[in-house]
Image (tube, rainbow, N blue to C red):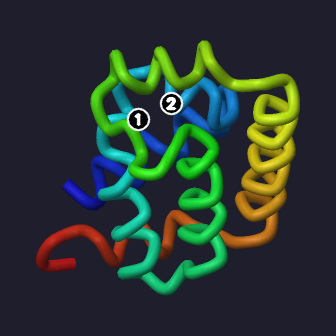
Amino acid sequence: MPLYAFGWLRTEVNNGGFHQLFLNGAGDVVADAVAASRRVGLPTRSALIERAMRVLGDPYPAERQARMAALEDLSASDLELLDMLSENYFDLEAAVEVDDHMRDLIPGA
């Protein structure tokens, strides 16, 4: 599950930011992606993801329908914050070769 969750998080955020991640089914496994990020030694990335999760509420709405409702209720400033966090994530993607870290999540590798 960690590799799957981390891979989906990267795909969704890189394609459409945190808003897209949270809107789609991959948002169901964000907590697993945070744990995977920590496990492979990417604490800055995991903290950034957690910050984005908190925009939707505490606790994070892991169920998709609840996330969709939370997204609909976000203020303009919350949406701007998600956009800013997405940009920060893009910067991290450009600065760190994450594929090597993801290989550490493959059982037996």
What residue sits 63% from the left and 44% below the top? 55
Name the amino acid type tagged 1: Gly
Residue 46 found in image quarter: bottom right
On residue 22, the disc is 2
Q: 23 left or right of 81?
A: left
Q: How far apart are labels 2 and 1 at the CA level?
A: 5 Å
What residue sits 85% from the left and 24% below the top? 76
Sequence-wise, the earlier of marks 2 and 1 is 2
Crowding near the residue tagged with mark 1, few <14, some 14–19, many ≥20 C-alpha atoms within 10 Å: many
Task: From the viewer's side, name the closer residue of 53 and 18.
Answer: 53
To which residue does mark 1 refer?
27
Helix, strand or loop for disc 2:
helix
Where residue 74 appears, x then y in whole percent? 68, 25
Task: From the viewer's side, name the closer residue of 7 and 59.
Answer: 59
Task: From the viewer's side, name the closer residue of 53 and 46.
Answer: 53
Q: In what quadrant of the picture does the C terminus appear?
A: bottom left
Q: Residue lying at the far left in this picture: please name it.
A: 108
Where residue 99 appears, x then y in whole percent? 51, 64
Name the amino acid type tagged 2: Phe
What residue sits 75% from the left and 44% below the top? 86
Residue 92 found in image quarter: bottom right
Residue 47 higher or lower than 32, as above or below: below
Disc tally is: 2
